[in-house]
Image: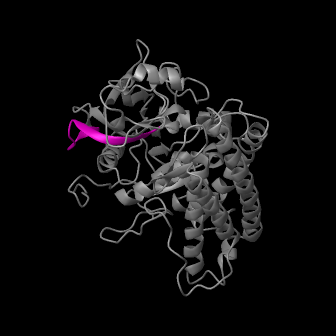
Amino acid sequence: MEKTDSSGSPGWAGPPVAILWTESLVWGLLCIDTLSALGVPFRLLSASEICEGYLDAFRIMIVPGGWAAHKVRALGETGRKKIAGFIDKGGSYIGFCGGAGLALSSPPALYLTPVRRMPLSERLPSASGEIHISGALSHPAWKGLPARIPVSVWWPSQFRMDPGCRAACLGSYDDPGAGFQVADLRVCDTGESAGWEQLEKSYGINLDPARIKGHPAIIEIEKGKGRLILSYAHLETPGDLWGNRLFLNILNYLHDVSGVSTPGGDKSVNGSPPAPGEKRNSSPLTRQEPSAAPSDIRYPPSGISKAKQAAADLIAFGEANLLWNWRKPWLLNWKRGIRGLEYGTLYVALSYMEELEHKLAAEPDAGSGPAVLCANWPERTKELEEKTLEFCALAKRLLFEEKIAAGMGMVSKTGTVNERVDPLRRTLFGKKMNHGGFCGALFDLIDRMLLDLIRGGGGGGAAADLATAFGGGHSG
C-alpha cells in the first residue's frame, strides 16, 4: 500500500538515505530539517566514511550545498571513485547547488558527468530567493504537481548543456517570484523599466533576470546502472511547500528505479523523523532564537553557549551598523561588498549546536551535563569558544573598517580596498570567496562537532554505529 503524507501526496516508505555531511554546514542543516519534516529517515556520512565504503549500504545519496572545492578536497580521489562506483552499480545521487556542481566536469568537481558549469561571464551569478520553474510533466518527479511551481535558489551556478550531452531537463527557470533578488536589488522593486544594461555596467556583473529564463534548473543524467539528479534549485529549503513536494517526488522516483539492494532498510537510524502524527519541534532554521535549555537542567554555560553568544553579539553589531538584517531565520540579507553568509552560518550553526547539546544533557542517562558526550568534549568546546571569540572580535574590526571604506566609495567583496581592510580579510577568509583562513579552520571544527551532536555524541563510534545499523554491510 502506498504511503501518503498529511496532504495526500505520496509519502516515503523506503530505507534511509545517505547525506554527505562534510563541508555542508547550514546547507546540510536545511537538508536534514526538511527530510525530517517529509518523514524520510537519513544517515549522515562523513567524507572519510564514504572513502571507507559505507555508501554501499544505501540506494540514494544526497549532497547538500556548500563549496564544491571544499568537498573535493575532503573526498579526494578515493571518495570520488567510491561515489562513481556507487552510481555505476545502480545508486542514485541527488545534488543541490554546490552538491550539483560537485558532480560536473568543470573544476573543482568529481567529474561524474559530462555536463559543465556555465562560465561566470555568461551566467546570472547573484540570484537569490523565490523563482518559478516549469516542469517536464511527463516525468514521474512531477506527479501531482502543477506545470509551474515556486522554488528557492541561493546564488546558483548554471548548467552548460553542450551539444550531444545526454542530460534530461526536469525543470527550467521561469519568472522571478516574491522577494527574488539579483545582488542587493529586489526585482519586484525595480519596475518594468529597470535599465538592466546600465545597472550591469555599474555593478560589473550580470543582473538581468531574463538571462536565466528558460535555462535548466534541474537535470537528470544516467550513469552506468544509476543516475544523478542535479538541482540548482534548493528544493530542500524549509517551508517551501512546492519545492519540498518535488524533492519527495524525486526521492520516490529514485527509490523506484534504483537497482541497489540495501541490508538495513527497515532499521531505526539516528536522524529518523518523528513517527506519523508526532508533533515535530521547530529548529533554529525556522525560528530566530532557539529555546532555552529545559528548566530542570542546571549546569554552567558550556563553551558552545559562550561561542553562540559571541556570534549573537556579532550579528547584533552588524544590525546596529545597518550592515544586514534577517531575510530568513537561517539567512542574513547583507549589504553589497561585505560577507554575510559566513557570519549568519556561524550563528545558525552554533544555535543548532547549543540546542542539541541541551537536549542531550536532558536525557536520563546524560549524567550531570553535556561533557559526557565523549572523553574530550570539554576540550573541544573550549577550543570552539576561544576560536569563535577571536574570530568575532576580528570580524567586528573588519566590518567597521569596511563600513568606513564604503562611505568613501565602492567596496568590492574580493578586490583590494585599503591597508586596514585587506589584511583583516586575508586573515579571516583567505584570498578566495570559498572561505579559507581563520573562518575555514573554525568551520571545519564546527562541521565535526555538529556531526557528533546530531548523531547523539561520541566522536569515535560513528563507523561502528553505521555497521550496526546496516547489519555490517559495507565494502572495505
Outermost residue, front direction? 408
The answer to which of 354 and 206 lies nearer the viewer is 206
Indicate the position of residue 115 as horizontal and vertical percent values: 47, 22
The answer to whether any part of residue 245 appears in the image is yes
Q: Is residue 39 visible?
A: no
Magenta segment: 141-154
Quadrant of residue 106 within the rendered picture: top right
- Quadrant in the rendering for residue 257: top left
Residue at 41% of width from left, 55% of height from top? 35
Depicted 115 relative to depicted 358: above or below: above
447 to the left or right of 139: right
Residue displayed at 26% across by 58% down: 5
- Give the camera-side residue of 129 and 22: 129
Q: Judge whether residue 145 is colored magenta.
A: yes
Q: Which quadrant, please, contains the C terminus?
A: top right
Compared to residue 265, the image places residue 103 above or below, namely above
Quadrant placement of the N terminus = bottom left
Check the image and name the residue furthest to the top: 163
Image coordinates of residue 363 in percent, x first then y, are: 55, 80
In-front residue for pair 382/125:
125
Q: Residue at x 57, y 46 (%)?
A: 341
**In the rendered structure, does residue 42 fall within the stretch colored magenta?**
no
Left or right of 328? Residue 308 is: right
Q: Where residue 356 sits: x, y (%)?
A: 56, 68
Q: Residue 253, percent across and down?
A: 32, 41
Query: Is the image coloured rainbow, by chain, by secondary structure, or in one colour?
Result: one colour
Residue 198 quadrant: top left
